[in-house]
Amino acid sequence: MRFFSVATFAHPEHFGGAERVIATVAEGLAARGHDVTLLTGHADRTPEREERAGVHVIRYELDRRNPLAFYRSVWRGVRAAMDAGAGRDAEVLHLHQSLSGLAALGRWRPSHRPVLTSFYAPYHLEYLARYRQGRDTGAVPLIPRVVGAVLRRGDHRILRWSDEIVVLSRFSRDQVEALDPPSVARTTIAPAGVDLERFRPPADDAERVACRARLDLPDDAPWLLTVRRLVPRMGIEDLLDACAVLAGEGLPFRLAIAGDGEHRGALETHAARLGLADRVRFLGRVRDARLGDLYRAAEVFVLPTRSLEGFGMVTAEALAAGLAVVATDAGATGEVLADVAGARLVPASAPERLADALRGLVADGDARRAAGAAARAHAEAHLGWDGHLDALEAAARRALGRHR
């Protein structure tokens, strides 16, 4: 099949779980013999076109000066690329994110050709969460409420025009149903996978020490790790508060925070205010080639999300790397960890409960190792990519069948 995949962001141009899924799926479909073109936005100076792992990558420039300029650049970039011939010979339009998807729909004429959507999260809810400190509910000023209503109409239109929809979790399927009830009948749940070779446990303690040395991380205490965009929805402030409780009890640990975002400065200030400056390392965006070492350097992974966790690719990577996992019960995380022995799930936005869950793992090396072994066993049994790619292929064939 010939796929034309349209995204606002994709990995490695942009750092995030959904973006990693987009790139991995495109490469996985290409490896199965499909012809895949990926149209994605990028703000830096990179080639307009290139071949990457069998995928034809086309980029359009993003303007991030302000939200309106950004929305316009996505709309114009997608349409200009399609007017220039991108996707002209494709059989299936594969949409990944609402802004770019809406721009593509008008040029694609979905009444004549099939549309497959990978739905990760409602864009309007992510937008509103910025004004609620990352939480599901809370007051939002009038103008953002109006913008959110417009974005909700965009989410709804994407679903309504899709012949087939693929989601990563039951949580996301329920979001589809809330937005457009008839669409749930065309929705397939297909959990994401993880590269089990790249994300693996260290062979022994010596390899873990070597990974820490390569990342300039001291080898004097257990390392907790989180990999997140630094925005309020990700709950890093709650994790820092939990760590302050453990530090006050004299427990030995360090925390590595990988990722970047608009909230970084405030988080660094908060960590210093809590007296954690000597325990917490803000790593910024870690290069893709070093992520495997980063997971192998740690012993406990923490996912402190406050809301809207559609799957949690970093959780899957941590499980594959054999880390004990502590996470908040936000979005689909409870589904992902439901059958993982030793994983610990706590309420969102409750730092004291997060501290309770971490305490035993920080203090007990045997508990960490047992939870890590169970995590890896679960990943090997359930987190390969083949199931997700099989589901996408089947959905694309059904979509094609409706237009023949």
Image (cartoon, rainbow, N blue to C red):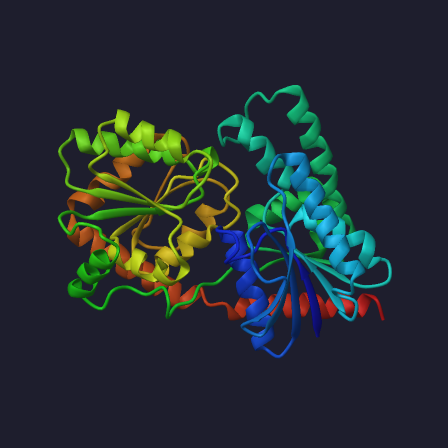
Q: Is residue 21 visible?
A: yes
Q: Is residue 72 left or right of residue 366?
A: right
Please tell me in which quadrant of the rendered image residue 349 appears. top left
* Along the line of sight, the residue nearer the viewer: 323 or 373: 323
Give the percent coordinates (x, y) of residue 122.
63, 42
Give the percent coordinates (x, y) of residue 143.
67, 23
- Residue that lies at the very extreme toward the front in this rendered image: 45
Q: Is residue 354 left or right of residue 135?
A: left
- Residue that lies at the very extreme toward the bottom in this rendered image: 33
- Residue occupying image coordinates x 27% and y 57%: 372
Give the percent coordinates (x, y) of residue 204.
18, 66
- Residue occupying image coordinates x 63% and y 62%: 48
Q: Is residue 392 left or right of residue 321?
A: right
Give the percent coordinates (x, y) of residue 294.
31, 56
Q: Is residue 4 left or right of residue 230?
A: right
Position of the N terminus, as image quadrant, is bottom right
- Residue occupying image coordinates x 85% and y 71%: 404
